[in-house]
């Protein structure tokens, strides 16, 4: 395959993948939703979970985006320096979003700031957002594709604490978001927490945390224990599905961390809604692909 | 009109204040008839710019939502996916909005606050939640898009005037007495949160 054909092929694959993840939830999320649906027992919670399950069946059957807010697309790229299309990737991802927007169809979610008009193509200045991790001496390319609606984007918050506030301060910061904005962000939520130095380092980590599979833990033992403490604590609030009360609030809590400046603790929280539309795909240098998040998909 | 059908409470437009009298926060209802999507900029145009809403929503419903639409022939449209957006964004406009338009049922996501409570109580309206993220369920309950106004706002913000059939489940969050389910829950949630924070803090003194 020549370079031009390769670019076309990868664009088509990514457009199809973007369309697909807007219609079918990842396996781990589906499983968790079914598990929580079983565990809730109030009539209101039951009706809400039944609607959610019916919606996912209809979305697949009718081949439509399961939630109308298909987000501003984000791509977390982990690209080998020897991946043949590394230079073309950012442009082709944008093209893939345009393609998916008309084919899926996706909602037009790019409003140019200051000029304040909707581009009508779902892409604009700096959208979709592409985050890069470069992997030396690899010829593979891993892409996390994420579609977050406005509702679960709204609670996002970051700040820098003084070390005196400690992890107790981190706890309070996260928990406050849950009862202020979290309950409107379509619980049960996936909660991502970043702990680092500054707002931007913590914020990036808190979003990256949402890419991890459910049931995974931070490799640091203390951080992992804090994930569990926060999960139990937020569940104890009892937000329930849609924040209307219930026995559970979250699908999980994921913490990602780096070292910090001795004088600061940067902390951030990002939440994913119950309709957590993330996909993970890995390409080799010949564009053979493996999808880890959704079983049985052919693009 | 309010009727019971197969154990479901169904509101059919036009809806009167009387129809809403016995509907309470926490009830589940369904809607038949006229419903128009109406969100951020439409509220701003009416309240701040003083423009008249180009769709008549009196005694009918609005839906805080931005759908995915597929254009058909002859200026017709298909509702592909539609679901509620965060109602709180419209809170600052909702009192005036209800007063000016005479809308009876506001459908959205999450709670609203004092302005909307006051409007619901004074003018006889309710706020309901459609379980969010269920956009295909909602779209299949839209029978027809009968009109599209303020199209200059783009697909999410256009006023899509729909005819709906047993649209729901709609969970009543604010009733005509001004009772607010979310605000009531928030008090309980905050108490539980304080207790949970206290418990977690016993185990996270990592800086020593």
Image (cartoon, coloured by chain):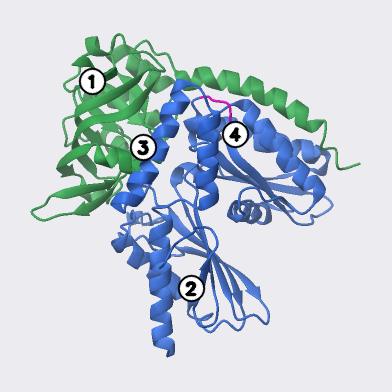
Residue at which label 4 appears: A178
Question: What is the CA distance from the residue labelled 2 to the residue labelled 3?
Answer: 32 Å
Q: Nearer the viewer, residue A33 or A67?
A: A33
Q: Position of residue A161 (x, y in %)?
A: 74, 43
Instruction: Tell me the residue that label 1 is attached to.
Output: B11
Q: Residue B174, can we see it?
A: yes
Question: Which quadrant of the figure contains the C terminus of chain A?
Answer: bottom left
B205 or A254: which is nearer to us?
Answer: A254
**For the residue carrying disc 2, how many other residues have a C-alpha within 10 Å: few (<14), some (14-19), or many (20+)?**
some
In terms of secondary structure, where does tag 1 sit? Answer: strand
Q: Report which colour depicts chain A.
A: blue
Can marks 2 and 3 be said to lie on one chain?
A: no
- Label 1 close to label 2 by CB (< 8 Å): no
- The residue under the point 33% across, 53% down is A107
| Highlighted magenta segment, given as a residue range | A245-249
Q: Residues within 10 Å of mark 3 (few under 14, many from 20)?
A: many
Residue placed at 27% from the left, 41% from the top? B139
Q: In x, y percent, where is residue A179?
A: 58, 30
* Nearest to N terminus: mark 4 or mark 2: 2
Position of residue B12 in the picture relative to residue A162 (left or right): left
Separation of residues labelled 1 and 3 (CA atoms)? 19 Å
- Identify the residue at horizontal 19%, vertical 37% (top origin): B162
Quarter of the figure with residue A52: top left
Q: Nearer the viewer, mark 1 or mark 2?
A: 1
Residue B159: % across, % down: 23, 41
Counting residues from the N terminus, which is met first, the one under dot 1 or under dot 3? 1
Write down the quadrant of residue A46 in the picture: top left
Q: Counting other residues with Cα less than 10 Å from the Cα at mark 4, is it few (<14), some (14-19), or many (20 or more)?
A: many
Q: Provide the chain ID for the residue under circle 1.
A: B
Chain identifier matching the green colour in the rendered picture? B
User: What predominant SS class does the magenta segment belong to?
Assistant: loop
Q: Which mark is residue B84?
A: 3
């Amino acid at each position: 395959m020549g370079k031009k054909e390769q670019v076309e092929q990868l664009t088509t694959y990514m457009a199809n993948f973007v369309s697909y993840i807007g219609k079918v939830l990842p396996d781990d999320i589906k499983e968790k939703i079914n598990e929580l649906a079983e565990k809730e027992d109030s009539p209101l919670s039951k009706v809400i979970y039944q609607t959610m399950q019916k919606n996912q069946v209809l979305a697949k059957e009718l081949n439509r985006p399961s939630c109308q807010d298909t987000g501003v697309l984000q791509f977390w790229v982990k690209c080998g320096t020897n991946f043949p299309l590394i230079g073309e990737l950012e442009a082709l991802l944008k093209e893939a979003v345009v393609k998916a927007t008309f084919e899926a169809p996706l909602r037009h979610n790019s409003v140019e700031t200051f000029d304040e008009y909707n581009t009508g193509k779902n892409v604009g200045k700096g959208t979709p957002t592409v985050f890069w991790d470069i992997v030396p001496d690899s010829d593979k390319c891993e892409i996390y594709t994420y579609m977050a609606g406005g509702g679960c984007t709204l609670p996002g918050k970051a700040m820098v604490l003084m070390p005196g506030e400690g992890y107790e301060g981190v706890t309070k910061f996260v928990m406050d978001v849950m009862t202020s904005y979290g309950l409107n962000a379509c619980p049960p939520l996936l909660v991502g927490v970043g702990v680092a130095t500054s707002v931007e380092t913590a914020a990036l980590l808190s979003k990256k945390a949402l890419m991890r599979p459910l049931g995974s833990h931070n490799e640091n033992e203390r951080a992992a224990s804090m994930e569990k403490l926060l999960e139990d604590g937020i569940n104890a609030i009892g937000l329930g599905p849609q924040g209307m009360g219930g026995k559970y609030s979250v699908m999980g809590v994921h913490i990602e961390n780096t070292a910090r400046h001795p004088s600061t603790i940067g902390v951030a929280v990002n939440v994913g809604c119950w309709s957590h539309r993330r996909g993970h795909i890995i390409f080799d240098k010949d564009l053979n692909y493996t999808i880890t998040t959704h079983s049985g998909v052919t693009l | 009109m309010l009727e019971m059908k197969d154990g479901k409470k169904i509101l059919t437009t036009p809806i009167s204040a009387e129809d809403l009298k016995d509907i309470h926060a926490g009830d589940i209802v369904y809607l038949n008839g006229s419903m128009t999507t109406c969100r951020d900029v439409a509220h701003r145009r009416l309240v701040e710019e003083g423009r008249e809403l180009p769709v008549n929503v009196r005694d009918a419903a609005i839906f805080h939502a931005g759908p995915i639409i597929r254009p058909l022939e002859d200026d017709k449209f298909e509702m592909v996916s539609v679901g509620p957006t965060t109602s709180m964004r419209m809170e600052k406009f909702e009192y005036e909005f209800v007063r000016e338009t005479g809308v009876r049922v506001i459908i959205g996501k999450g709670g609203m606050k004092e302005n909307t409570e006051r409007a619901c109580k004074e003018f006889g309206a309710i706020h309901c939640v459609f379980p969010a993220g269920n956009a295909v369920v909602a779209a299949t309950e839209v029978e027809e898009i009968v009109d599209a106004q303020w199209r200059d706002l783009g697909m999410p913000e256009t006023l899509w005037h729909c005819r709906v059939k047993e649209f729901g489940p709609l969970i009543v969050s604010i009733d005509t007495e001004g009772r607010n389910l979310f605000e009531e829950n928030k008090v309980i949630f905050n108490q539980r949160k304080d207790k949970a924070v206290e418990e977690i803090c016993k185990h996270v003194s990592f800086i020593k």
